[in-house]
Image (tube, rainbow, N blue to C red):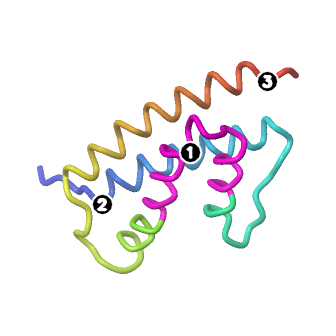
Amino acid sequence: MAEDWDWAFSIAYNAVLQAARAFMYSQGFRPVTEQGHKNTFAFVREALGDEFASLVGYFDRMRTKRNQAIYDVAGLITETEARGILEKAVQFVDIVKARVRATPE
């Protein structure tokens, strides 16, 4: 079976985006539809603060790469990149789950 690193990358990115949006919603906000991914990461960068700025910045950079892989260039993502985003995605989802659980209802 052949690996599809573009798809693996995209799935990991989508997990991060959905977690970021869940966090955003838990704080009472919604992203606007125009530039929704970009605005979601801008919100999360502010809401999580300096401690996680590097991690959120990484995902914001990967947003552009994901767009290229999905819409422009097939085979763009390497195995290393796909495994890297997956590792960081697991870390990010854990951070967001902890923050959402800590949010008063």
Neighbours of disc 2 within 10 Å: few (<14), some (14-19), many (20+): many
Which residue lies at the image location 57% right of the left edge and 34% below the top edge? 51
Q: Quadrant of the C terminus?
A: top right
On residue 92, the disc is none
On residue 6, the disc is 2
Q: CA distance from mark 2 to mark 1?
A: 25 Å
Left-right relation of 98 to 8: right
- The reply to whether discs 2 and 1 touch (Cβ–Cβ < 8 Å) is no
> Seen from this angle, which residue lies furthest bottom?
72
What's drawn in magenta, residue-wise? 40-63
State the residue position of label 3.
103
Which residue lies at the image location 70% right of the left edge and 47% below the top edge? 46
Q: Nearer the viewer, mark 2 or mark 1?
A: 1
Local SS, label 1: helix
14 part of magenta stretch: no
Residue type at numbered disc 1: Ala
Left-right relation of 98 to 83: right
On residue 53, the disc is 1
Neighbours of disc 1 within 10 Å: few (<14), some (14-19), many (20+): some
Q: Main secondary structure of the magenta part?
A: helix
Which residue lies at the image location 66% right of the left edge and 38% below the top edge? 48
Q: Position of residue 77 (x, y in %)?
A: 26, 62
